[in-house]
Amino acid sequence: MLLKSVLKDKIKKRLINIRDLRLYYLIVCEGAKTEPNYFESIKKELPVGLLEIKIEGTGRNTLGLVKHAKILGEKSTRKFDKIWVVFDRDSFPERNFNPFCSLFVKKQLKMDQIE
């Protein structure tokens, strides 16, 4: 009995110091079906337990996607290691697409800077 108690205490101490090495990703897509289906297929090919990926398809425009991704990240009980926003260039007029991309590329804007 004493040996069992000692072993349980040692196991508990070891488990306390173990951290979760899994990475958590959020992928927010422009398309409601096609893009999420692509990512779901890729997700099935990944080793189990390495990544946890949440995929959400929306019908939003470029900036709307980013704002929606930010809201999802903030409301989630899980902190995401990476948040990806996926959209097609051909779905938006150039006047909407180019300024949006320059916000992130030239200024290296971060998610927490989006309002």
Image: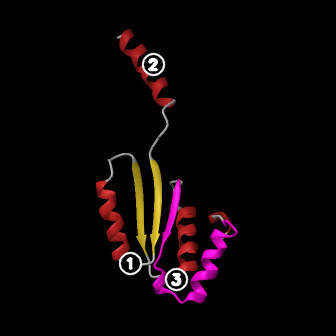
Residue 35: say if magenta. no
For the point 47% across and 62% down, the residue is 26
Say what secondary structure mark 1 lies in.
Answer: loop
Q: Which mark is residue 113?
A: none
Whichever of labels 1 and 2 marks the residue nearer the N terminus, that label is: 2
- Quarter of image, res 36: bottom left
For the point 47% across and 76% down, the residue is 87
Q: Which mark is residue 10?
A: 2
- Pointer 1: residues within 10 angstroms few (<14), some, or many (20+)? some
Q: Which residue is mark 1?
A: 32
Viewed as shown, does residue 45 lie left or right of 24?
left
Residue 81 in picture, x, y percent from top left:
53, 53
Q: State the extent of the magenta-drawn residues as a range.
A: 81-109
Please state which of residues 22 and 88 is positioned toward the viewer in this rendering: 88
Whichever of labels 2 and 3 marks the residue nearer the N terminus, that label is: 2
Q: Which residue is mark 3?
A: 61
Residue 73 in picture, x, y percent from top left:
54, 62
Say what secondary structure mark 2 lies in.
Answer: helix
